[in-house]
Amino acid sequence: MDIKIFDTLKGELVNFVPIKNDSVSMYVCGPTVYNLIHIGNSRPMIVFDAFRRFLEYVGYKVTMVQNFTDIDDKIIIKAVKEGVPFNEISERYIVEYMKDALALRIRTANFHPKTTNYVHEIIKFINELIDKGFAYESAGDVYFDVRKFEQYGMLSHRNPDDMRSGSRIEVSDIKTDPLDFALWKKAKENEPSWESPWGKGRPGWHIECSVMATELLGESFDIHAGGNDLIFPHHENERAQSMAHSGNDFANYWMHNGMIKVAGDKMSKSIGNIWLVRDVVSKYGADTVKVFVLSKHYRVPLDFSEEGLQAQKKSVSRVQQALKDAEDFFAGTVPYVKNTEYMKSKIETFKQALSDDFNTSKAVALIFDLSAELNKALSEKNETHVIENYHLIRNEFGPVLGIFEIQETQQKSSTDDTDKVMQVLIQLRNQARTDKNYTLSDSIRDGLASIGIQLKDTPEGTKYIIQ
Ligand SMILES: [Zn+2]
């Protein structure tokens, strides 16, 4: 079966042919860990997790790498603000990222490398670029010499001369060309830094992905993926450094997802239109969030709105209910069935949709159709057809897209109930404290602690942590 994907470098749909017959190597740019992730950040997570699952579904062994950028200006600024070491910030938000990914039921990658664990390899890589004449040291920084790399601009389809004349002329004695970018940044005072041949400093952003991809996947690998806001400069620069370094191709295919927008704007902290992943997941459930994302083709922009989510939640609940009804129909466990002719033809349709530049929108629509078929079979008490449609959704297509894998509704309502009970208890305790009835307030706190629930008084009110 041919898999077609849109390759950003070629600018067209191409047949996907991996370097090795039976396996695929894939690098996805991960987050800079300095705050909680928002729903815009979740699109590449959801899309490329599903794409990886699809590749596995059709028989490839996939090695996936997703990095954490754990040293960066934003992390340093936050650390200074909180008066803590920079790695306390990055470690905290790696843990929070993992929690959100788990709540979304995103599978972990095979490798989640952190930049700071690769500084030695980064320095070596930069040194080799200098030796090969592609980089130069200047006042403690090291820059990539864009003019030396003929293909610069090819990935983002930009002409370097246009970029030079279009950009404001940068007055700089440090760089030889305004397009040159930093591989190594000289440390400012009190900044975290590492020893290097060029003095104390830290890696630039782009070089880390080149080095970690090369270390873990080799100098040439199959797919490099990420949001389309990374095409320039991040991926253009990664490609330039890596190809200059190895003299070979870097990634054979470049896949980019479109942005999630709110009323036409990109979701970003500076605009203040942020929806945190954890808030949206706890309100709507992971299935709804993922179906919302996957029901649109991954390359087109996706408009985020609560109305959109609410509408999607209705369709998602219908599927969840149909699956539950099927389980109840068989008193808990739906019997196993080998693929029937009906199932084989649906599987073919499903694979075809996803082989066509990963058209998850078609695949999700197919699941909705099957859910309607399932309801019909239930009302007609057509056992075979109940079994077929149930397994297609729950065990065949759901796991490929990462949706409808578990019965989500019950799990969510019990969390909601816990929250409601906790709010009542917190109110009771605070009332007891206002009344100076410390025996009661302490016994509520200690009673909760004894079952692993810790109360924390914060400026925003009392919070609880379930351990
Ligand atoms: Zn990257």
Image (cartoon, rainbow, N blue to C red):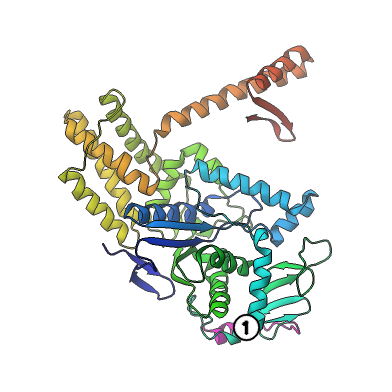
Q: Which residue corresponds to the image point at 47% horizontal and 39% vertical from the top-left?
A: 284
**In this view, 445 is above or below 371:** above
Q: Reply yes or no: does residue 238 show up in magenta.
A: no
**Tag 1's secondary structure?**
loop
Q: Tell me the residue that label 1 is attached to.
A: 134
In the image, is the residue at mark 1 within 8 Å of ligand 1 by its beta carbon? no
- In the picture, residue 395 is in which quadrant? top left
Q: Amino acid at mark 1?
A: Phe
Which stretch did the figure color magenta? 159-174
- In the picture, residue 359 is in which quadrant? bottom left
Figure label count: 1
Whether residue 222 is visible: yes
Q: Position of residue 74 (x, y in %)?
A: 70, 58
Using the image as rendered, state which of residue 56 and residue 44 is in the foreground: 56
**In this picture, residue 181 sits left or right of residue 279:** right
**In this picture, residue 230 sits left or right of residue 77:** left
Quadrant for ligand 1? bottom right
Using the image as rendered, state which of residue 29 and residue 299 is in the foreground: 29
The quadrant of the picture occupied by the N terminus is bottom left
**In this view, 229 is above or below 281:** below
The quadrant of the picture occupied by the C terminus is top right
Q: Reply yes or no: does residue 166 show up in magenta.
A: yes
Q: Position of residue 326 (x, y in %)?
A: 27, 30
Q: Furthest residue to the right?
A: 189
**In this view, 348 is above or below 239:** above
Q: Position of residue 407 (x, y in %)?
A: 39, 33
Q: Position of residue 261 (x, y in %)?
A: 50, 57
**In this picture, residue 83 sits left or right of residue 59:** right
Q: Which residue corresponds to the image point at 27% horizontal and 37% vertical from the top-left?
A: 390
